[in-house]
Image: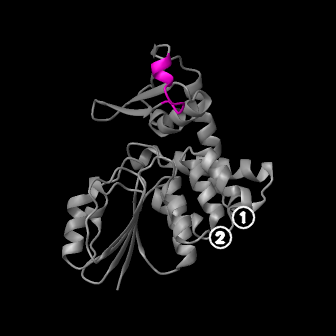
């Protein structure tokens, strides 16, 4: 049997896989993409009897490849919180999928492992812009306010690194970033000893400062739209900037448009988190 770990290269995917491999360490082939590279199962050469873990990528976007895997005898464990559509019923598929919008894949892995490595679920939830979920998870851990802020910074930096149109847009490709994280059961030791984390944090803050100096291209009582310049930093920061705006103004909608190399725009949208906000505005 060969093992394959397929995951979204953002904080949620990295922290979900890290929990799994801390609990069940095996030699596996890692397949990851940038945040928007989610049609990943077609790249997995698994055959009859192999086991594939899929984390934080939409089943709906990977359905044909998943069906083909199951048909050839591959065992698949699927963890995700995105839209899945109809979930196949198959003896080789175990699916832990929650589309409620109130959780993320790191939290689903935490449930699966009964909280054994919860601190990494906290990091993943912070990175996935779910601070309330992260704080609820962290409450039994007895962490200080300073420790929680460090975990928030770590999650946001891991998440930031996955945002880009191409590998040359980011500081380090997600598979390599996961490899470096995988050496550290303790996130605070990772923060102390791994230089790339400090580099990511500094680059993220610099890119956010660039974005914050721009004015919205369109502003209405209930929503803002921003158009970022055609630059690598824009492609890196678009999702992080959208999250920052959403958390700062949860009653408003936010859209971030970023030029792509294809001559189109990539759009990051954040809906209001306050029910009825747009209707009331």
Residue 229 quadrant: top left
Mark 2 touching mark 1, by CB under 8 A?
yes
In this view, the residue in front, 110 or 190, is 110
Count of labels shown? 2
Would residue 93 be counted in the magenta stretch?
no
Kindly tell me whether residue 174 is visible in this rendering: yes
Q: Main secondary structure of the magenta part?
A: loop
Depth check, mark 2 against mark 1: the one in front is 2
Residue 142 quadrant: bottom right
In this view, the residue in front, 264 or 150, is 150
Name the mark on residue 185. Answer: 2
Residue underneath mark 1: 189
Name the mark on residue 5. Answer: none
Q: Residue at x 47, y 49 (%)?
A: 162
* Mark 2 neighbour density, 10 Å: few (under 14) some (14–19) many (20 or more): some
**Residue 71 location, x and y as percent?**
19, 74
Would residue 277 be counted in the magenta stretch?
yes
Question: Horizontally, is 30 left or right of 67 in the view?
Answer: right
Question: Horizontally, is 248 left or right of 263 in the view?
Answer: right
Q: Is residue 160 above or below residue 51?
A: above
* Mark 1 neighbour density, 10 Å: few (under 14) some (14–19) many (20 or more): few
In this view, the residue in front, 26 or 61, is 61
Q: In which quadrant will I find the N terminus?
A: bottom left
Q: Residue at x 76, y 53 (%)?
A: 147
Magenta region: which residues? 272-281
**Residue 50 location, x and y as percent?**
32, 81
Q: Is residue 265 above or below residue 112?
A: above
């Amino acid at each position: 049997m060969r093992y394959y770990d397929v995951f979204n290269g953002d904080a949620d995917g990295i922290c979900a896989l890290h929990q799994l491999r801390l609990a069940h360490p095996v030699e596996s082939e890692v397949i990851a993409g940038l945040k928007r590279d989610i049609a990943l199962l077609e790249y997995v050469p698994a055959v009859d009897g192999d086991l594939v873990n899929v984390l934080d990528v939409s089943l709906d976007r990977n359905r044909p490849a998943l069906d083909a895997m199951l048909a050839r005898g591959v065992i698949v464990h699927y963890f995700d919180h995105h839209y899945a559509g109809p979930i196949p019923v198959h003896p080789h598929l175990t699916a832990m999928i929650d589309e409620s919008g109130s959780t993320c894949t790191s939290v689903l892995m935490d449930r699966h492992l009964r909280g054994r490595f919860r601190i990494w679920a906290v990091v993943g939830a912070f990175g996935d812009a779910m601070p309330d979920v992260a704080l609820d998870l962290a409450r039994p851990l007895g962490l200080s306010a300073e420790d929680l802020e460090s975990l928030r910074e770590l999650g946001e930096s891991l998440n930031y690194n996955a945002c880009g149109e191409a590998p040359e847009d980011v500081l380090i490709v997600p598979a390599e970033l996961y490899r470096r994280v995988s050496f550290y059961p303790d996130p605070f030791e990772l923060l102390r000893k791994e230089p790339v984390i400090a580099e990511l944090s500094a680059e993220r803050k610099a890119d956010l400062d660039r974005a914050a100096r721009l004015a919205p291209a369109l502003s209405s009582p209930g929503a803002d739209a921003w158009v970022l310049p055609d630059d690598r930093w824009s492609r890196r920061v678009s999702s992080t900037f959208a999250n920052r705006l959403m958390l700062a103004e949860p009653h408003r909608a936010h859209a971030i448009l970023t030029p792509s190399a294809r001559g189109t725009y990539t759009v990051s949208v954040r809906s209001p988190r306050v029910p009825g906000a747009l209707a009331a505005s």
